[in-house]
Image (spheres, grey):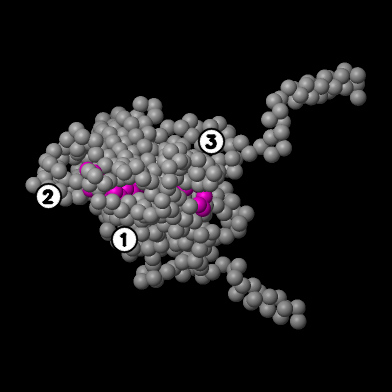
């Protein structure tokens, strides 16, 4: 079951600045909502997102309850070398999702 | 009224009074206008945002410029608002954006999100989707590699959607 | 004199704004999808599958399509093969007449009927993640095709019932669907643009829900917005209204899975 969608160009020229788009499936329960009976619904959100390029972290984000459900994050990076661009989301209640994409840099 | 019934009523009334007398003063004071859990209680203030920004910058000088925060002037829906931040920077080893933090003045919490970049980013531009509690001005602050801080802001109007479901 | 006064009053009353409008629908050339009234950023969410959160539901639906289930231990794919082929055009002509029950049913009910009859599985609850995923996946196979709901003698009463519901004033607010979506489409209600309300993209990812939901969920939202008691999920009143709305949108392209405010 796919719970993360990442868009990375398959190929790029060395030095080219590429856009990366990511989406992860998560409700992002803020902790401010209450049930019909008034009982608070506990916070349950994605907390961190990190992107590594052949093992080196090139981008990271710290998420808060203000981020909409199914968090979308897009950013840029320089295509330096062929290899794996890996993504990792971590959150409350042991939430942990990884994804990766291969890029060929010429 | 029978003697037994009136005595029961007196005792229950006395019990209520006794219980009320032991409530903490703060609760009693709030009893007349309890905002806890209401929408008003969850609204942040500009003051909260300033405190959060100062915490990020370590109260160092904050200059306006370089940071372009894009928010739709009137949102389609406050639950999912697409925003983007772009910071003017050559993004070289010597001169780049280290981190960006986005702040809100009306959300329950002043920090919306933080990003860490670096020279490998190539371009200091990020986009995400956020929840906005009310019509407000958002502020994005960028921390540069030379230790300086820059900011940009954008106002937006947030209305409540028509036709909600019953909670 | 009294008869004349009554007749005059009736004439005035029939032309007054609160009288029932004639049951005409919007000409094809003037039908507009709610997509056109959305901000650039929201449209971008819909345009790109990789940034449309509804894609998660499509992918889950694809998994469910291939998963064996029920006492018959059978997957949808075993009878229907590749959904891109077998389901192409299906959502574009639903709701449709069901020979077995003799009624018009919607896509969700069709999926559940298959589960019960062919897979010997329990029906999925309305608005459950799995039913929404399957419905979104099936409807997605009609994306780009024109809506082709075609009433006939058997289904005419359902169309008429749906049209009557559309024109009936309901709730404490005492408005009908037609009053907003026919008479005032294009104007604004509390900062939100009023669409013509064509269900071209269901199930949709609604920004308000921050999730995918069915047309019935949206219709129930409208009803509670008018302070009316919403019809139950799966009720014939809602299915007939869906039927009328899809017929009213005939010729427009299916956009599933659409993004809407």
> What is the C-alpha distance between the residues marked 2 and 3?
51 Å
Q: Chain of mark 1?
A: C
Label 1's element? loop
Q: Which residue is mark 3?
A: A34
Q: Chain of mark 3?
A: A
**In this picture, residue C82 sits left or right of residue C43:** left
Label 3's element? loop
Q: Which residue is mark 1?
A: C253
Indicate the quadrant where residue C31 lies: bottom left
Q: Please tell me which residue is depicted at 82% across the width and 19% down the height of the picture.
A: B11
Residue C241 placed where, x, y %? 46, 55
- Could you say which disc has been placed on residue C136 in the image? none
Indicate the quadrant where residue B28 lies: top right
Q: Please tell me which residue is depicted at 43% across the width and 38% down the height of the picture.
A: B58
**In this picture, residue C223 sits left or right of residue C114:** right
Mark 1 and mark 3 in contact? Answer it, CB < 8 Å. no
Q: Which residue is mark 2?
A: A13
Per the rendered image, the range of residues in magenta is: B119-136
User: As rendered, which of C233 and C113 lies closer to the eye?
Assistant: C233
Q: Please tell me which residue is depicted at 79% across the width and 24% down the height of the picture.
A: B17
For the residue carrying disc 1, how many other residues have a C-alpha within 10 Å: few (<14), some (14-19), or many (20+)?
Answer: some
Q: Nearer the viewer, mark 2 or mark 1?
A: 2
For the residue carrying disc 2, how many other residues have a C-alpha within 10 Å: few (<14), some (14-19), or many (20+)?
Answer: some
In this picture, is C72 found above or below C188?
above
Residue B160 placed where, x, y %? 52, 52
User: As rendered, which of B91 and B103 lies closer to the eye?
Assistant: B91
> What is the C-alpha distance between the residues marked 2 and 1?
39 Å
């Amino acid at each position: 079951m796919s719970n993360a969608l990442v868009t990375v160009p398959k190929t790029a020229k060395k030095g080219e600045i590429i856009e990366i788009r990511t989406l992860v499936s998560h409700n992002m329960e803020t902790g401010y909502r209450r049930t019909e009976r008034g009982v608070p619904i506990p916070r349950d959100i994605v907390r961190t997102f990190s992107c590594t390029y052949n093992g080196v972290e090139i981008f990271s984000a710290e998420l808060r309850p203000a981020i909409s459900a199914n968090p979308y994050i897009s950013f840029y990076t320089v295509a330096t070398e062929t290899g794996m661009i890996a993504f990792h989301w971590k959150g409350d209640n042991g939430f942990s999702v990884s994804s990766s994409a291969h890029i060929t840099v010429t | 009224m029978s003697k037994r019934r009136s005595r029961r009523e007196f005792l229950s009334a006395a019990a209520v009074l006794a219980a009320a007398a032991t409530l903490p003063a703060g609760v009693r004071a709030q009893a007349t206008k309890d905002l806890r859990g209401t929408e008003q209680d969850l609204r942040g203030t500009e003051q909260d945002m300033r405190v959060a920004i100062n915490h990020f910058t370590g109260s160092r000088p904050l200059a306006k410029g370089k940071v372009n925060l894009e928010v739709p002037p009137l949102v389609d829906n406050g639950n999912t608002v697409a925003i983007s931040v772009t910071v003017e920077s050559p993004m070289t080893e010597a001169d780049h954006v280290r981190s960006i933090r986005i702040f809100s003045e009306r959300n329950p919490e002043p920090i919306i999100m933080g990003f860490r970049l670096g020279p490998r980013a190539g371009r200091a531009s990020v986009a995400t989707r956020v929840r906005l509690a009310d019509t407000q001005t958002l502020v994005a602050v960028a921390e540069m590699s030379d230790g300086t801080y820059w900011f940009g802001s954008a106002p937006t109007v947030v209305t409540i959607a028509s036709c909600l479901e019953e909670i | 004199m009294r008869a004349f006064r009554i007749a005059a009053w009736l004439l005035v009353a029939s032309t007054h704004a609160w009288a029932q409008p004639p049951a005409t629908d919007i000409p094809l050339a003037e039908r507009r999808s709610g997509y056109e009234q959305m901000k650039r950023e929201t449209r971008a969410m819909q345009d790109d599958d990789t940034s449309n959160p509804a894609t998660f539901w499509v992918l889950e639906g694809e998994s469910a399509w291939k998963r064996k289930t029920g006492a018959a231990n059978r997957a949808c794919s075993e009878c229907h093969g590749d959904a891109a082929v077998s389901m192409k055009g299906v959502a574009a002509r639903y709701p449709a007449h069901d020979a077995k029950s003799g009624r018009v049913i919607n896509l969700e009910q069709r999926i559940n009927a298959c589960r019960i009859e062919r897979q010997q599985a329990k029906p999925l609850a309305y608005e459950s993640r799995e039913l929404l995923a399957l419905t979104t996946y099936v409807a997605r196979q009609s994306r780009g095709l024109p809506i082709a709901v075609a009433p006939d003698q058997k289904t005419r009463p359902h169309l008429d019932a749906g049209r009557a519901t559309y024109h009936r004033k309901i709730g404490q607010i005492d408005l009908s669907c037609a009053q907003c979506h026919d008479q005032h489409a294009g104007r604004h209600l509390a900062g939100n643009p009023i669409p013509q309300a064509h269900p071209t993209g269901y199930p949709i990812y609604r920004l308000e829900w921050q999730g995918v939901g069915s047309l019935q969920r949206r219709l129930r939202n409208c009803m509670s917005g008018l302070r009316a008691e919403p019809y139950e999920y799966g009720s014939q009143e809602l299915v007939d209204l869906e039927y009328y709305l899809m017929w009213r949108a005939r010729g427009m392209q299916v956009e599933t899975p659409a993004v809407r405010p």
